Amino acid sequence: MPNLDHLAIFKEGIERWNAWRAEHRVVEADLSGANLTRMDLRGADFTDVNLKEADFRNSIFVRPDLNVPRFNGANLSKAKLSRVSLSGMDFSGANLTGADLIQAELPAADLTGANFTEAELYRTDLTGADLTGADLTGARLTGTIFSMTNLTGAEFNNAFLHETVFNNIDLSVAKSLDQCNHIGPSVIDLRTLRQSWPLPLSFLRGCGLDDVFIEYLPSLMGQAIQFYSLFISYSSQDDDFAQRLHADLQSKGVRCWFAPEDLKIGSKIRPAIHDAIRLHDKLLLILSEHSVRSQWVEDEVERALDREHTEGSTILFPIRLDDSVMESDTGWASSIRRTRHIGDFRAWKDHDAYHRSFERLLRDLKATG
């Protein structure tokens, strides 16, 4: 409920409201839950006003001959702003948590530092808007238009994307793109790819780019392929480590095939795995007490060794989580121990030790030509 005294002043007209706000900046103006539909709100000063759950639908905000309203610092959480034209307006630092901005028009708006957590931005037009430092955590971005939009420091953690338009923008300055929820494919143009390269593989895949296209992206961007692509071979009992390593490799631009994410529903498992081993440059083998006893891992290693024999190049990249491979009398495991340098991740649960080993692995995975 709004403060009834504040609402009465507002209903006296925009000029009276603005004069009162100028004289009483220290007062926390409260229009929360107010019905402000079908009103002429041109030039209104809503700076730092509590507008939680206020309804602005079908109101007029923008006309070329008048100053636009200001919402900087306002609390607009769960406010209703659907299908409203808000072009060029100031929402800097505003709280728009859970707000309804369905099909709202916000071109050239100042949205710096605004909080859009769990906001509904279905087909919202953000062309030319400035979202520097904005928080889009959990926001629903279906059909949202990001065109020539400034996303420096914008947070996309857990945002929902589907048919989202990324046109002529730099996504490299945004945060947590690898943590987006892709409900369906999105639209990302070549200019965005050029400005933003490299982008997380999980994000590119989520946008609908297939692996073949992604593999050729570096050359399209005029860059050499930086890292070999990988098939990750491991025991399911080492899933915690494998998941962590996979995520870190992806964030560095290493294209990986990882069964929990890349094995398509309904695929016949062994043929799909064999194809993946054939199509990737290297097989990254995670050795542990579990994997040295795994028939699946043994089969994958044999496939990699067959490729080495046929192609005359090194395919197998072994790393270890414990000393089992150094003590094993299993034929293939003991052969690896005798003939290969094995990367050491035994202390992977220690943050610093893990990152030292990871940086060494990255160095060795750099493509040489």
Image: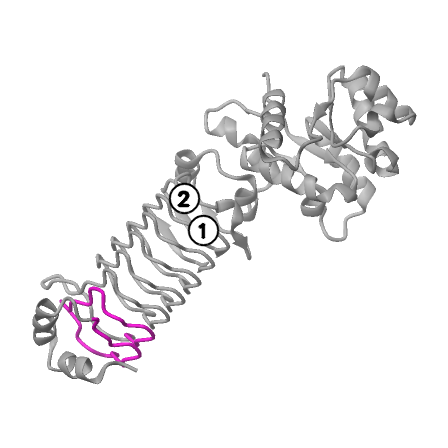
Tell me the magenta residue range: 28-56
Left or right: 252 in relation to 327: left
Q: Which of 107 and 295 is in front in this view?
A: 295
Whether the residues at callouts 1 and 2 have beta carbons within 8 Å, the answer is yes
Q: Nearer the viewer, residue 244 or 367?
A: 244
Residue that label 1 marks:
156
Q: Relative to residue 150, is residue 57 depicted above or below? A: below
Mark 1: secondary structure: loop
Which residue does the image show at 39% across and 35% down from the upper left?
195
Residue that label 2 marks:
174
Relative image position of residue 366 (x, y in whole percent) = 59, 21
Question: Considering the image in quadrants, where does the N terminus appear?
Answer: bottom left
- Residue 36 within the segment the image draws in magenta: yes
Q: Which amino acid does label 1 sit on?
A: Phe
Relative image position of residue 360 (x, y in whole percent) = 61, 23
Which residue does the image show at 51% across and 26% down from the upper left?
219
Q: How crowded is mark 2: few (under 14 residues within 10 Å), some or many (20 or more)?
A: some
Mark 2: secondary structure: loop
Relative image position of residue 158 (x, y in whole percent) = 50, 55
Q: Which amino acid does label 2 sit on?
A: Ala
Which residue does the image show at 72% across and 44% down from the upper left?
239
Snapshot quadrant of residue 117: bottom left
Left or right: 80 in relation to 198: left
Q: Which of 203 and 235 is in front in this view?
A: 235
Magenta highlight: main SS: loop
